Image: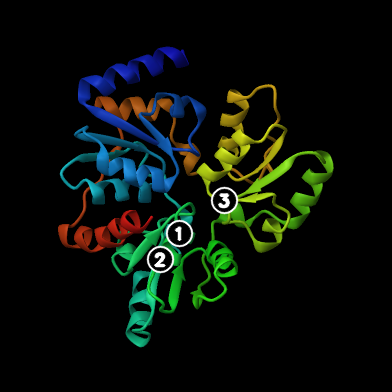
Amino acid sequence: MMKELQEEISRLKKETGTAILAHSYQSPEILEIADIRGDSFALSVAAQQLAAERILLCGVRFMADTAKLLNPEKTVILPVEQAVCPMADQIPPERVRRFKESHPDYMVVAYINTTTRLKAECDVCVTSSSALNIVRRLPDRPILFIPDANLGGWLKRQLPKREIELWDGCCPVHAAITARDCERMKARYPHAKLAVHPECREEVLAYADYVGSTSGILDFAERCEGDVIIGTEKSISDWLSLRHPQRRFPVLSKKLLCSNMRLTGLADVYRALNGTGGEEIVMDPALAEAAKRPIEEMIRLG
């Protein structure tokens, strides 16, 4: 049944001139039918280079919004309108606007996991894979980094000479992991490497053999010869296990499940393609123009 649905989706893709972009946290059956797979940065770059007139974004809302910002003339569809990122709404744009008024010397750097309205208040966006490289290239001015304090804290430790102010945002999924989780899994798999996402707490990063983005964790695990404990969303463990069934990729904790990423199924993709489901992304042109600037700056610097 699943293969038949995948084949029908592939047929509809060609018939409707649609390209499917899927974040790496999507289920393996969706990754299999995607034209482009990757983390937020890879999807942002790919979205701007696609020839297709329609884009179906399998992920969460801020990713579909980003695709629309970079392709205002194209139709961009989010298969499940309820698929959102909790972190994206944690910082009100008005709070940033007030901060800029009282701190005009600061640059505002926003993790891409933010709303379009918040991006419009920022100087540059970053992803977990591009943040370090981009911040290194920014002018020597103090930085307000929002919203993820864990990713921002990791950046501060990598760049101790930069003045970086953090606020109180986080990814609820990654932030739920503790040092105790690391101790337990290290004891269970004593010869395995541990790869974790920088959205995790500092106490978790201290146990890691590798700290990096989703794509970085995938690359690290592919290069390793033995088992790798996966410290990010479980779908990465699932994907690696399918590719390398002779190896083990245990997920660091059962808490590493993003319910919003898991909302999208093959049937949702099918309905979005045949016009009976999904939500087309529509934006106010003035807002889109303001929010597009930090995204384009991210691509230029990243």
Answer left or right for 61 relative to 274. right
> Any mark on residue 137, and which?
2
Mark 2 or mark 3, which is nearer to you?
2
Query: Which amino acid, by three-letter code, is at mark 3?
Result: Gly
Q: Which residue is mark 3?
A: 212
Could you tell me residue 173's position as x and y percent?
58, 51
Tell me the amino acid under the disc marked 1: Asn
Question: In this picture, is 37 found above or below 84?
Answer: above
Q: Answer yes or no: do the residues labelled 1 and 2 have beta carbons within 8 Å?
A: yes
**Mark 1 or 3, nearer chain start:** 1
Image location (x, y in percent) of residue 23: 44, 39
Residue 200: image location, x then y, percent: 62, 56
302 relative position to 27: left or right? left
The answer to which quarter of the image holds residue 286 is bottom left
Q: Residue at x 29, y 31 (%)?
A: 19
Residue 258 at least partly seen: no
Kindly identify which residue carries mark 1.
Answer: 133
Left or right for 147, reference 14: right
Question: Which residue does the image show at 32% across and 27% down from the upper left?
Answer: 271
Could you tell me how far apart the alpha carbons at marks 1 and 2 are, in whole angstroms? 7 Å
User: Could you say where residue 61 lies in the image, as x and y percent from the top left?
Assistant: 36, 48
**Total numbered labels placed on residues in the image:** 3
Disc 3 crowd rating (10 Å Cα; few below 14, some 14-19, many 20+) is: many
Q: Give amino acid for label 2.
A: Arg
Where disc 2 sits, the SS reads: helix
At x 47% / y 55%, what residue is drawn? Answer: 86
Task: Indicate the secondary structure of the residue bearing disc 3.
Answer: loop
